[in-house]
Image (cartoon, helix red, strand yellow):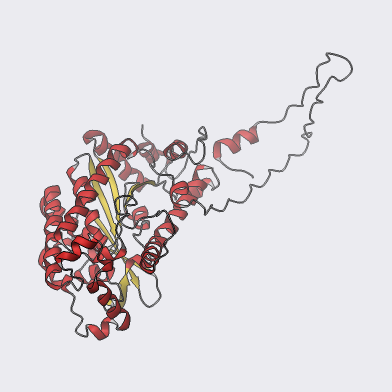
Amino acid sequence: MSAAADARGRGWRLRFKEAPTEPRGEGPRACAGIDARVRDWRLPPREAAAAERMESMRKKSNVRMINLALQGGGAHGAFTWGILDFLLEDPRLAIEGLSGTSAGSVNAVVLAHGLERGGRDGAREALARWWTSVAELGTAISPVRRAPWEFLLTGWDPSFTASYHAFRALTQAFSPYQLNPGNVNPLRSLLDSQVDFAALRSCRAVKLFLSATRVRDGNIRVFHTHEVSADVVLASACLPQYFQAVEVGGEAFWDGGFTGNPALFPFFYECESRDVVIAHVNPIVREGVPVLPDAIADRVNEVTFNSSLIAELRAIAFVQRLVAEGWLKVEKRSRLRYIRMHAIRADRALAEFSEASKYELDLAFLTMLRDRGRETAAAWLDRTWPSIGRRSSIDIRREYLDGAPMVDPPAPARRPRRKGVPKAKRAPKGPVSGPGAKPARRPATPRSSTRSRRSTGRSGS
């Protein structure tokens, strides 16, 4: 009987079993040790029933359900297009939830629209149609244009071109309220022409969570499927130096990457699947220290837009440790879910591209990023497939928090010794009275309290 099915009879109670501790910092091996210790959770009845349905479906069809978290990054979102295209092609995977920011929100909305209309093939066609249209639009109105001879000199990096530096100088000297008083956004007409938002708001094929940053207080706002509109998508992708703030429901919003790139917490409360896959666009690791002004600005941009994700991963790692090591009370433990984390990293695939290439909308560049995304996703799935649905495939602390150790939980209080039980004395190390004499035996101590602490994970009364 599965843990989910057994939970129906036992209600909210939680059974916690000890398992051999895996070496810390061993990547998936360490995560497997944690999973072994939490696989006997007792879920609340409603979640237990949902988990039982998912488990039954997985066993019958061998389909594993995942949630996808999509980062933003301008034209580099075409890399995510390639990742999604490959994952949709694989029938062994099904997507339950999509969390997106900026370009990730656009990819999520287009995928959900296509999935609702035409299934997996419809989603792939919708993504291809969207990015082809973006390239056509960029050819017509992009402020960053290059002459043919500049392609030969700079490749796909427009940071050395005159048009890029003119664009940057103009946007640093004037605000979008001065440069674009009519608030014209070409993406709005493109979204309206390719996405039926009225139908999307009742989409049942996948759950949507789009993040934006509220200008008034700087907090994140996550929009759910029934709230999605063209304004919501534009708000999630609104870089304030290029676009006027987008109003939704009387509130002004900027790009969601400032507060959640992307947000992971909606999956914990809204989705049944516990497997979360992060599709990275901004590299986490870059070797070497940047020394040129553009390189410094590029790295600052990456660190800034990765910081909210790192903070959320730090919280996840800390909760995983609390649960695995039994630091929480039994009645509190049942309110938490162990999340299996996975990541498709862009450190190698996009390491050669600067921040300026996020403005490059040439179709050849976008399709090249798509192909790299497909290759990266294929390698990731081959390596990670045995872990999906079973354990985390990344060690959050080693891969994301290296150099920023987590705060250890407080030391457990010692259980007071019961009255009438003599304190155990250590036996002498050598013979007591003569050569070959046996050391005195240690007085027996009650084992019930120790067994109780071991089986429940509690450290005191």
Q: Quadrant of the C terminus?
A: top right
Quarter that holds the N terminus: top left
Q: Residue furthest right?
A: 433
Query: Is 329 situated above or below 281?
Result: above
Looking at the image, is 87 positioned above or below residue 211? above
Residue at x-position 47% and y-position 46%: 398
Is 406 displayed left or right of 89 in the figure?
right
Instruction: Give the residue at x 23% y 34%.
Output: 60
Left or right side of 325 for 364: left
Q: Nearer the viewer, residue 460 or 383?
A: 383
**Can I make out residue 57 in this image?**
yes
How many numbered callouts?
A: 0
Position of residue 72 in the picture relative to residue 397 (left or right): left
Residue 350 position, x and y percent, is: 30, 54
Question: Does residue 203 show up?
Answer: no
Furthest residue in direction top, as rendered: 436
Q: Residue at x 11, y 63 (%)?
A: 133
Whether 39 is drawn above or below 163: the answer is above
